[in-house]
Image (spheres, coloured by chain):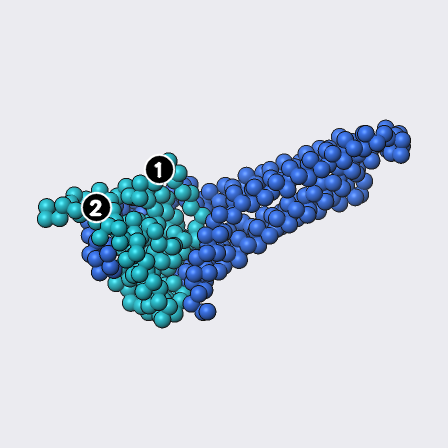
Chain colours: A blue, B cyan
Amino acid sequence: MNLDELKILWDSQEQGIAQDRVSRDEVLALLEGKGRSALSRINRNILIEMGVVALFGVLWILMLIGKASPPSSLEIAGVFLYVILSAVFYRWKFASLNAARLEGKNLKSALTHTVKVMGRFMRIYYWAGWVLVPVLGSVSFLYSVFTEFQESGIDPASVAGSRWAIIIGIMLIYNVIAVIFVKWYVEKLYGKHYKVLKGALEELEEDTE
Amino acid sequence: MVQASSAPIVATAQGMDQSTNQKAAFLDMVTQHQGIIHKVCRTYCDSQEERRDLFQEVVLQLWRSYGKFRGESKPTTWMYRIALNTAISGFRKKTRRPQYTGMPDYVMDIPAPEDDPDYHEKRSLLYQAIGQLSEVEKAVVMLYLEEKSYEEIADIMGITVNYVGVKLNRIKNKLKHLMQPYT
């Protein structure tokens, strides 16, 4: 089959397309019923993600309130930093994904922009998953263990080696789970799509080689 | 006094008029040229559900960008750009099908002409062939089949006119190879 034969077949689909035609009112209804669109799904996913992050924040604050001793300035600063960083990140993510990135740009420019934005998201998530979550998680876990010892009047030096092994074991399990989860989440959210888009962009960039 | 207090109301009314006119012009344009969106949807989606979602997505993206459309290019070129950008780079939910038959559900949407009993088989071959091309190749071949000039294809895709020729040659060879078992 050559392109001319393909052209004849291509033109023959006009009749089928005529059946698919929608009226002006139906186009208007599509504009008003945004619920099914991919962009709505993305925004919904961002909201779910924000909800989970906010829940962690609330649990953290509740833990601090529920403590026997008043929270230290380091703990309060930690909560503030968490809230501010989360708010800035989600504001930026929401704006990047909702920007009219497709407004009449040619395919190569649109793909370049999308791949760049997605690459940034992925780097942030990987960095958070492999560095921030384990480091912050370990620090806060050990901090809470030492605070607990202090409040109960236990000398950390007197704690048996087997108990320390359990504490370190729990910390390691947490870190491994966190890293696996973030890797899975990023791959599921962007990984496959990112590879497809990068492949398409590379194909267009062959032009300049 | 009256003039001063009614000025914002007049401005709001004018703004509303402008917005209504803009929406009306947009609806006219999309309704008139909707064939472009349908063809992009057929090129990139196999199932009716996917096509319906992509159609809506393209209409929404067109509307979001419409305010910034200054008419530097033809409305149809602008529509092709946005439709293809949405189809290729948008986050679309793919329908999971247990078994790929290689035949989109719209192959049988029109009755075969009496003088061409192999009509449906040929159409099935058309979509099978296009389905095996890369996302970029699908866009190039679709624009070529829509009789767009090399310049227009280059403009929509963001590549050089020479590269359009190179791409089309590669696609021709690929199609020949892909369709060999059937011809």
- Left or right of A105 on screen, residue B148: left
Q: Position of residue B123 (x, y in %)?
A: 23, 48
* Residue linked to disc 1: B99
**Is A121 rendered above or below residue A64?**
below
Query: Who comes first in sequence, dot 1 or dot 2?
Result: 1
**Is B32 rendered above or below residue A151?**
below
For badge 2, the amino acid type reads: Glu
Q: In this orientation, does residue B139 appear?
A: no
In the image, A53 versus A2, the foreground residue is: A2
The crowd level at tag 2 (other Cα within 10 Å; few <14, some 14-19, many 20+) is few
Chain ID at mark 1: B
* Residue linked to disc 2: B121
- Where on the picture, by quarter, is residue A140? top right
The crowd level at tag 1 (other Cα within 10 Å; few <14, some 14-19, many 20+) is few
For badge 1, the amino acid type reads: Gln
Q: Position of residue A39 (x, y in %)?
A: 45, 47
Asked which secondary structure carries label 1, the reply is: loop
Q: Residue at x 45, y 69 (%)?
A: A208
Q: Residue at x 14, y 45 (%)?
A: B117
- Left or right of A156 on screen, residue A19: left
- Left or right of B61 on screen, residue A195: right
Count of numbered badges drawn on the protein: 2
Q: Position of residue A37 (x, y in %)?
A: 41, 44
Mark 1 → mark 2, Cα distance in angstroms: 19 Å
- Where on the picture, by quarter, is residue A169? top right
In the image, B100 versus A153, the foreground residue is: B100
In the image, A51 versus B114, the foreground residue is: B114
